[in-house]
Amino acid sequence: MQEKFYKEIPSQPFTANGTSNGIVTLASTSKYKLYQLVVILHPSLSSIAGEIKDILSDTQIAVGPQGANPNMRIDLSAYNTLATISAPEQPRPAVATQDIDRFTYEEAPVVARRTIPVDDTGNILKFVRNAPGEAKSLAVSVDKLSFSSFSEARVTDSFQGAAQGQALTISASPTEAKGGATALLTRKGVFIMPIDKSLYMGFSGSVTSANGIPIYINQMVYVPASAGVPIWLVSSSGTAEARVWEVG
């Protein structure tokens, strides 16, 4: 169970020679945790079982003897880039409730339980407030999903102010539901309301009252469709009036 155990970390090669004060340089330290037990191997030297005493950066960790003073380090100066480091699956250390309070409390001037963002090595992420009108930039990575470099932070499905509408006369021949002579280029959706007769809606010019989706008198529907997805309306007989608004 991941809640109770640290997952095994496969062998990773040293990307620089080890140091006398126990520093190991890797391509990434993001999977390692403080006080996690590790094993260092070298083809011509003795293996070392140690413990992570500090995570110095996203590429360096400090290794010391297991269970010893947190300031103690193992001399790794003989371990060059032929060495590797790994971590076996192991129980996560128990954390007392009072320690959780201590770990998540942020001192003055914040004076609050910490809910601020940090990077993979625990460093607090700082965001710079931009001047009005200045382009914003932000990079966010969530597992396999990432966003970066945008001008304004917006919910992309929200309306941005563009709109057009009109009253349409719908007959037994399909009529495209659009708010003007041409569909709104930035359209995100269309509001449709029949006024005096039920209508039938479809997504091709061959829609009929037999195969279309019924929209009843005074029933307003919203269809999330861009300008590239035309919406067609038809009446079962005679003509009918409809109100159509596009928003973008």
Image (spheres, grey):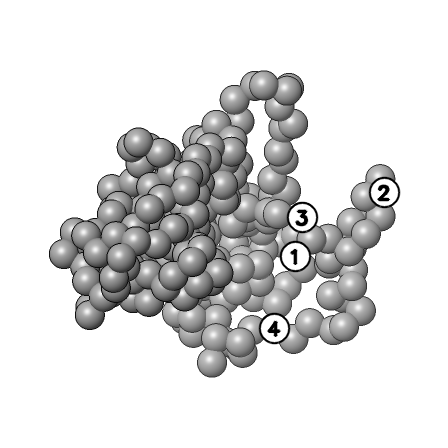
Coordinates of residue 16 in the picture (x, y in percent): 36, 39
Viewer-side residue, 117 vs 234: 234
| Residue identifier under label 2 | 108
The single residue placed furthest to the front in the displayed view is 238
Q: Report helix, strand or loop for mark 2.
A: loop
Q: Is residue 156 left or right of residue 205?
A: right
Q: Are marks 1 and 3 in contact (CB under 8 Å)?
A: no
Q: Which residue is mark 4?
A: 93
Q: Nearer the viewer, residue 9 or 203?
A: 203
Residue at 38% x, 38% y is: 179
Q: Which residue is mark 1?
A: 70
Mark 4 falls on what kind of element?
loop
Q: Give SS at disc 3.
A: loop
Q: Nearer the viewer, mark 3 or mark 4?
A: 3
What is the quadrant of the C terminus in the image?
top left
Q: Secondary structure at mark 1?
A: loop
Mark 1 is on which residue type?
Pro
Quadrant of res 109: top right
- Count neighbours of disc 3 (C-alpha within 10 A) and say few if under 14, some if 14 to 19, many if 20 or more: few
